[in-house]
Image (cartoon, rainbow, N blue to C red):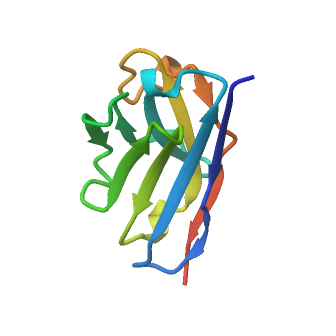
Amino acid sequence: EVQLVESGGGLVQPGGSLRLSCAASGFIFSSNWMGWFRQAPGKEREGVALVSPGGVTKDYGDSVKGRFTVSRDNAKNTVYLQMNSLKPEDTAMYYCAAGRLYPAFNPSHYNYWGQGTQVTVSS
C-alpha cells in the first residue's frame, strides 16, 4: 500500500520557521520526483517545491523562492520542506506528492498524494 504521511505543520508567528517532513512507503521512493504543494481555502493548489529522484535538481514556486528549501533522504524515504521567514500568506494545507516522470508543478502528473499537514502563520 502506497503511503505518504506529512508531519511538522502547526501554528507559527510571522517570521518564524517550520520544517515539514513526508515519509513515504509502498513504492520506490528513490525513483520518484517529489513535490510539495499547498492549498488555502478558496484557492487553487499551488506548487511550492520539487526535487529530483537523486536530490540534485530542485525548483520552487515564485512565492517561496529564497525562503523555502526542499531536500530528501532516500535512505529514510523522506522528503523535507524547510520553511523560513514565514508570512501569513503561507497559511495553507501542505501536501507532498510523488511522480515517476518529471512532473513540474502540474498536479495531474503526480501519482501519489499525502493527506496534508496544516500550516498556520499568525500572530
> From what the image shows, is residue 83 above or below residue 101?
below
Residue 59's spot in the image, x, y percent?
Answer: 28, 39
- Residue at left 54%, top 21%? 28
* Residue found at the far bottom of this picture: 123
Which residue does the image show at 60% across and 61% down from the upper left? Answer: 8
Residue at (51, 81) in percent of width and height: 13
Instruction: Give the x, y percent position of residue 67.
Output: 31, 62
Residue in front for this viewpoint, 42 or 40: 40
Q: Picture coordinates of residue 34 (x, y %)?
A: 45, 33
Q: In this image, 74 relative to 102: left or right?
A: right
Measuring from the top left, give residue 3's x and y in whole percent. Answer: 69, 32
The answer to which of 70 and 62 lies nearer the viewer is 70
Please determine whether, in this image, residue 115 is positioned above or below residue 30: below
Q: Is residue 15 left or right of residue 88?
A: left
Which residue is nearer to you in this view: 41 or 74? 74
In terms of image quadrants, where is residue 118? bottom right
